Image (spheres, rainbow, N blue to C red):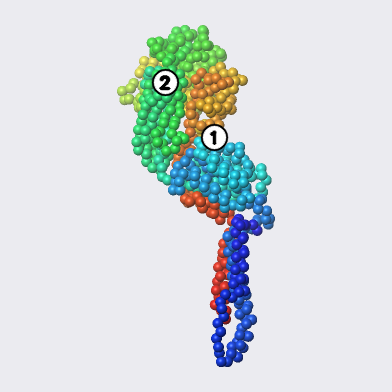
Amino acid sequence: MQFAQPAALWGLFLALVPLVVHLFSFRAPRRILFSNVSLLKEIREQNRKRSHLKHLLVLASRTLAVVLLVLSFARPEWGGDGKNNSALRQGYHSVFVDNSPSMSLAGEGGILLEQAREAARSLAQQLPATDQFQLISHELAPGSQRWLGRDEFIQALAQITVTAAVRPLNQIKERQLELIRYTGVTHKARLYWLGDFQNSAYPLADISIDTSAVVHLLQFSPAPFAHVYIDTAYVEQPLLQTSQPARLILAVRNGGSRDAEGVRILLEMEGAQKGLSTLDVPAFGTASDTLGFTPAQAGILTARLSVEESGLDYDRHWYMRMEVADRFPLLHITEAEASPYVSGLFSGDEFMNCSVTSRLNIDYNALSSAKGVILDRLSQVSSGLLTALHDKMQQGGSVVVLPSGLSDPIVVNSLLAATGGGKCLNVVAQRQQVARIEVKDPLYQETFERIPEQLALPTVQKYWSTNLLPDDYTIMQLADRSPWLVRRKVGAGQMLLLLSAPEKEWSDFPEQALWVPTLYRAMLMAGGNMPSSWRLGSTPRIELSIPGVRPDGLISLVNGPQRMVPQVSRQGDRLGLGIMDGIMTPGHYSVMLDGQPLAGEIVALNASSDESELQYWSAESLSALAGERGWNSYSLRDSSVAGGLVAEAGSSGLWRWLLAGVLLCLLLEMILARNIT
């Protein structure tokens, strides 16, 4: 047997009090005179032995009641293995204090993190001074992988502050069990989780723990709160142009249980204010808006959306990178003569820097620098050009294929084979009209929201029947459901394939109003596949396309004083950078090569949304789950009682039987005292 509160055993000396009362009579005897006491003497002799026995029983019941009462306060426990080594059986406690951003909110008892620290102090003070403690938080600091004495543990609690580096609960649990296994503790492990238990951050239903572990869940709940944050934001245009109006689409969410009114959202670019929006967001609801701006300079620009008075500071900003161009390099590859429908479209455009070249005289340097390529009715394609076009699309380029009117579609089939498969089968000579257009496709995002009734759709006389891949996306479809304008995603870029030659004998599409926005926006979509931002917690890897990077160069990400060296994988000009969740914080990071900036490359990282949703496990659901798993759960308003509740749950329950024994002894003493004569 062992005792959770061995100091209470000093109270056993109180068992001497009934003995002292029994041995010494503090009441003076009274003398009464009788004329004849012979009969009384006879009765006294008969009852002396019986009375003496009753007095002894009263003494025993009183003494036993005092002993049992003292033992119940000492909280005895029986060891499952029959051993009494307290250092091995009960002396190790692993305590996780949730210091995520949501713990900075206030509850009935004050700031949640302060409540958690006070509860941990209460827990340590209720346990023997010889016990050992592990203190772990979201930082997973190296110092957390060791045992602390009680006083050292209480001092370390004061050093815990709120952090944005939030780790998954499964990772926290493994760190706790790792130290216990390393120490060689073979008895039941005791794990303590102190936090607010958000649904998104605490997937308790997915947590599995060895059945030998005893888990205590201590929950602290915040007051009703409104918390508004940016859920997503993106630029409507695939490519921004200097001095041209642009629109930013943003979606805002309220992760709190109270409505938010008049929330101000500020857009800043390169530190200067560019737009302002005011929204009402219902509890656990969303709202959206559009902010207009005009970029004044070319290059990779930094942008930031800020929510004023969002509630939690850690996710009130949304960081973005925006690529703005003053000229767009375009390469138009022709056969013998360029199509007037293509050359006429781009020849007078100052923004579209269109270079026209024959397939027999291709400048591969111009091809490398071009963002968009148009293949205009080519009859042949070399293996070198196929490789260059494939690499261009892998890096984010856009290639538009306008097939020739020849009976052998060798160029189209070669490109299909090089980019995954598929084939043009035969020419179908059947007059029909385009019956369906995907108006929500990015290709037509700025053209129209729906098909106007007066819009003349292309009429087709001849087209190629095809056998394409399941992932190929049909933008225009004919009346017989045959694909006619198809987009294939290739790496970070795309290939847009028209299945009729741009000639009058095939279709009237080049003379239709849709011809201009289709080709123009197909080019502008080049390079627009690079995300404007990434979210921590859901993006394990960032893909960048940076040509000319030395394979032996050291890549790093720098945000002010913060410098990270990510894990890097290389495939040609593409770099894959591993994101270090729990270490990197939201913000704009410059991509560095050997300590020098890489051509203004910027990575924008945003906070995980797990902590933004302020929905919690209810006390009832937490208790039900704990009951199923054999855990102990407590929903606390007063942190100071945490130690007593955990100590009570951790005991064997023997103290309850001891208190019952105290009551029985007192009842027996009362019965005996009434019958003493």
Q: Quadrant of the C terminus?
A: bottom right
The answer to whether residue 172 is above or below residue 515 is: below
- Of the pair 498 and 593, the residue shown nearer to us: 593
Q: For mark 1, give the secondary structure.
A: loop
Q: Position of residue 134 (x, y in %)?
A: 60, 44
Q: Which residue is mark 2?
A: 240
Amino acid at the residue labelled 2: Leu
Q: How many marks?
A: 2
- Pick out the residue farthest to the bottom: 35
Q: Position of residue 159 (x, y in %)?
A: 54, 40
Q: At x 44% / y 15%, what residue is drawn? A: 328
Left or right? Give the position of 25 relative to 314. Answer: right
The answer to whether residue 72 is above or below residue 615 is: below
The answer to whether residue 485 is above or below residue 122 is: above
Q: Quadrant of residue 230?
A: top left
Q: Position of residue 530 (x, y in %)?
A: 48, 24
Amino acid at the residue labelled 1: Gly
Q: Quadrant of residue 273?
A: top left
Q: At x 55% / y 33%, what residue is drawn? A: 583
Q: For mark 2, give the secondary structure.
A: strand
Q: Position of residue 77 (x, y in %)?
A: 62, 58
Q: Which residue is mark 1?
A: 582
- Pick out the residue farthest to the left: 454
Tell me the CA gap for discs 2 and 1.
33 Å
